[in-house]
Image (cartoon, rainbow, N blue to C red):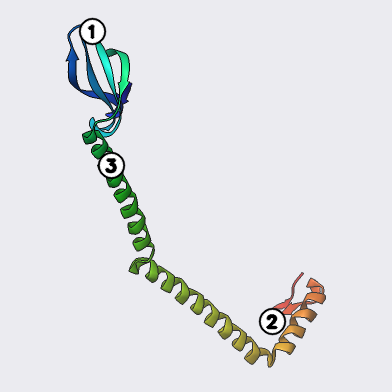
Amino acid sequence: MGTVNGVGLTIYGNTDFDAETQSYITTHYFVILGIPIIPLGRYRVRDLGGRKYSFMGKFPLRPADRWHMGIAAGAILAVILYAGISAQRNANSDYSQGATAAADADAAAAEASAAANTARSRRFYGSERRCRRFWQRRRKQPASAVTHSHGPIG
């Protein structure tokens, strides 16, 4: 039993004090930031001092503890559902739709550019077939045979 940075297990309350055994009944809780969230059980304990206890027996949870557990479980479920719905809304938000539209526009621009390059090549070489033949012949020629306006390379 203990907490780290306010999160962990601890006991709260003391009811039904027994003078003979110097013990009382307390509730064992899971806590967050020191706030009891979920009651785990009720126990008869004897305080030994220095945050040490002797557990003498277990008791059933009271109706109020059961309500506390139900409300805590409902609140946790509500937070989980809210987080899921919020994440879904963010996935379908205008920003993500805009990003998808921008990606589609970029793809369309790339296709248009490729089509324009193909059309330019066809105009220059006369047809796609002649263009293909030109580059095939060019690959077959040795580098020394390729000439430029300023003379042979090599």
Q: Secondary structure at mark 1?
A: loop
Q: In front: 66, or 105? A: 66
CA gap, disc 3 and disc 1 = 33 Å
Q: Quadrant of residue 31?
A: top left
Q: Which residue, given by chain and number where applicable, does mark 3 sit on?
A: 70
Q: Amino acid at mark 3?
A: Gly
Q: Quadrant of residue 24?
A: top left
Q: Which residue, given by chain and number where applicable, does mark 2 sit on?
A: 149
Foreground mark, 2 or 3? Answer: 3
Contact (Cβ within 8 Å) of mark 2 with mark 1: no
Contact (Cβ within 8 Å) of mark 2 with mark 3: no
Above or below, 123 relative to 7:
below
Task: Tell me which label, 3 or 1, sits earlier in the chain.
Answer: 1
Residue drawn at (24%, 39%) of the image? 67
CA gap, disc 2 and disc 3 = 88 Å
Quarter of the figure that contains the N terminus: top left
Q: Amino acid at mark 1?
A: Thr
Above or below, 62 relative to 98:
above
Residue drawn at (23%, 22%) of the image? 26
- The x, y position of residue 71, in whole percent, is 25, 43
Q: Which residue, given by chain and number where applicable, does mark 1 sit on?
A: 21
